[in-house]
Image (cartoon, rainbow, N blue to C red):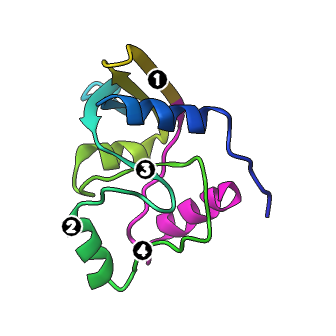
Amino acid sequence: MASATVPTWHPLLQTHLSQSPSSLTLATVTRNNHGQYVPRARTVQFRGFFPDPQNMHADAISALETHGIGRNPLAYESDLLTLSTDARMEKAREIMENDQVELVWWLPTIQKQWRLRGRAVIIGHPESKEEEKARRMIQPWL
């Protein structure tokens, strides 16, 4: 297993987030009715860094327990960002079709903007082939 180091931006982002309220926008790409690629952007909630998301909604914690999944072990640290959504939402489908995303934070108190671009995966259905693939993909970054 390859080990990854926490990048220099990680602590700085955490510092900035602690200094200002923020809004986070997630941009995905999907095809419209004419087959053309179009961007989709929406405000989302940043939950922390994987594998230990903070501020999880009580329903999310309950769902993990109900399905016997449990929370992630605290043995790992990473620079992987965690967002949560209902799997029935369009953004989940868009990420499964095209995993390229961009996140934009605006922190008004300190007048800073953060932009991060990368790949996203959906985790939350342990029996699916996509889940196995996603977990194998992120394992080297823990």
Name the one closer to the observer, 48 or 93: 48
Give the position of the N terminus as an image quadrant: bottom right
- Mark 1 vs mark 2: which is more N-terminal? 2
- Mark 3 vs mark 1: which is more N-terminal? 3
Q: Quadrant of residue 22?
A: top left
For disc 1, the marked residue is 114
Residue beneath the point at 32% across and 30% down: 25
* Placement of 68 over or under 110, stated as above or below: below
Structural distance between the alpha carbons of marks 4 and 3: 14 Å
Give percent across and percent down for residue 35: 34, 27
* Placement of 82 over or under 115, stated as above or below: below
Relative placement, left or right, of 78 versus 63 is right
Give the position of the C terminus as an image quadrant: bottom right
Asked if residue 95 shows in the view, the reply is yes
Segment colored magenta: 117-142
- Element under disc 1: strand
Question: What residue type is disc 4 on?
Answer: Arg
- Mark 4 vs mark 2: which is more N-terminal? 2
For disc 4, the marked residue is 71
- Disc number placed over residue 58 in the picture, else none: 2
Name the one closer to the observer, 96 or 123: 123
Relative placement, left or right, of 38 versus 133 is left
- Mark 4 vs mark 3: which is more N-terminal? 3
Question: What residue type is disc 2 on?
Answer: Ala
Question: What residue type is disc 3 on?
Answer: Gly
Structural distance between the alpha carbons of marks 4 and 2: 12 Å
For disc 3, the marked residue is 48
Residue beneath the point at 31% across and 18% down: 108
3 and 1 marks in contact (CB < 8 Å): no
Residue beneath the point at 53% across and 74% down: 73
Give percent across and percent down for residue 52: 47, 62
Question: What residue type is disc 1 on?
Answer: Trp
